[in-house]
Image (cartoon, rainbow, N blue to C red):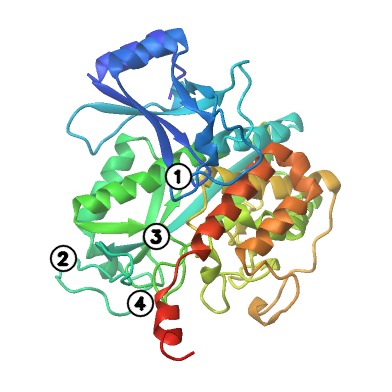
Amino acid sequence: MASRTAAEFKEWIKEHRITEVECLVADMAGIPRGKILPASKFLASIDSGTLRLPDSVFGQMVTGAHAETEHTTYQSPDMVLMPDPETIRIVPWYTEPTAQVICDCLDRDGRAVAVSPRQVLKNILAKYHAKGWKPVVAPELEFYLSQKNLDPDYPLQPPAGKSGRPQTGRQAYGIDAVNEFDPLFEDVYNFCEKQQISIDSLIHEEGVAQCEINFNHGDPLEVADQAFLFKRTVRQAAMRHEIYATFMAKPYEQEPGSAMHIHQSVTDMRGKTLFSSKAGKDSRLFLAYIAGLQRNLPAVMPLFAPYVNSYRRLVRFLSAPINTHWGHENRTVGLRVPESSAQSRRIENRVPGADANPYLAIAATLACGYLGMTENLNPTKPMEGNAYASTRFALPRHLMDAIAKFRASSDLREIFGDAFVDLYSDVKASEHDAYQQVISPWERQHLLLNV
């Protein structure tokens, strides 16, 4: 998409007969927040710099309430929203011609707001570019379909497809199982095409009514923007068909969780891979990148597994990793190296959940690799065999353990900044406190009359 000046914004809006514009900012959870304006007011705000939003949106929990934090001011000063001209798109599910645009956030002095998740990713990419390195990523995003769930006390139920019968068993890679929901996925692909979201293949995953969409590899910021919009797109498409789509890490009991596997590689500025030697062997930088992931994954876990529910996915033998081992063509490890040509050599980080904020998950995995490359770290030997049998290099099993590691990491504080680490940790800790106030059905079932 070509760069647009304010005048070109006006021309684009006129060409598409846009009447309203949604100005989007991703909060810590990846929830779109912002403002909806008439097109005329949107254009006027670009000229005057008057499109604003309180900085307190980054202190909001997934519940919508504000976190208990010492790291934001009670005054909630306004930020100036700067629409990124590369991101303006049609919103395809509305009947009224509506545009959406992703915004960057500036403070009153014109500086980028450092705690904005999109800015966190941009800061990591700037570190790569300063070294003459160009990261490339491609997420694989899993999600479940379910019947509408109007009472959250009740478990989810798989939806019925064209046959009229809900799935009752796992149908991994089943073609007919995906085709049950053809009308929904036709909408998804149509909506993505209209929004220039570059998705590739669709498969049925291991769980009941679980699917996966693969994104084409590309620039990390552009891919993160697309993943941010894609999650909203799938939810909107599903509701048109009277069902839900959810990116919860573990929405169904006894079923595998949903991941956001991130394939990643690094090239020079001309596009030549840095992960292979001239002879086609694993390069020193490739091994150092893996080592950076191995050392830092436990501390960066709140960005990959941000909720209590996230850790229900990370259990043995349910297609999710439990440690930081790496290996070639091994799906039991946290860091898999797929079979590929030398130029396409890459690492698949299998740890992030589908519930993670795409900006922060991509930023986190690239940050870990960057630290490994700049510090010339050495990885362990590749795992050959079942990584679930290993008790070494374990990932955190609980959210509060992960938050403590994140807060304590001097390396991550240096690369992300104290302001982001403190605020994000406070938001996650407050969400955990809110969860602790809820009495679960399990407690009522087993404790009410037995203890």
Residue denoted by label 3: 143
> What's the distance in space between the residues labelled 3 and 1, CA to CA?
13 Å
**Mark 3 or mark 4, which has the lower sequence index?**
3
The relative height of residue 20 versus residue 443 in the rendered view (above or below) is above
Q: Amino acid at mark 1?
A: Ala
For label 1, the crowd category at 10 Å Cα-Cα, with few meaning under 14, some 14 to 19 and many 20 or more, is many
Q: Nearer the viewer, mark 3 or mark 4?
A: 3
Residue denoted by label 4: 170
Question: In the figure, is residue 242 to the left or right of 85?
Answer: left
Question: In the figure, is residue 41 to the left or right of 187?
Answer: right
For label 2, the crowd category at 10 Å Cα-Cα, with few meaning under 14, some 14 to 19 and many 20 or more, is few
The mark found on residue 227 in the picture is 1
**Mark 2 or mark 1, which has the lower sequence index?**
2
> What's the distance in space between the residues labelled 3 and 2, CA to CA?
19 Å
> What's the distance in space between the residues labelled 4 and 2, CA to CA?
17 Å
The mark found on residue 162 in the picture is 2
Tell me, yes or no, whether the two marked residues, 3 and 4, touch with CB atoms within 8 Å: no
What residue sits 41% from the left and 72% below the top?
206
Percent across and percent down for residue 84 are 47, 24
Percent across and percent down for residue 388 are 64, 79
For label 3, the crowd category at 10 Å Cα-Cα, with few meaning under 14, some 14 to 19 and many 20 or more, is many
**Mark 3 or mark 1, which has the lower sequence index?**
3
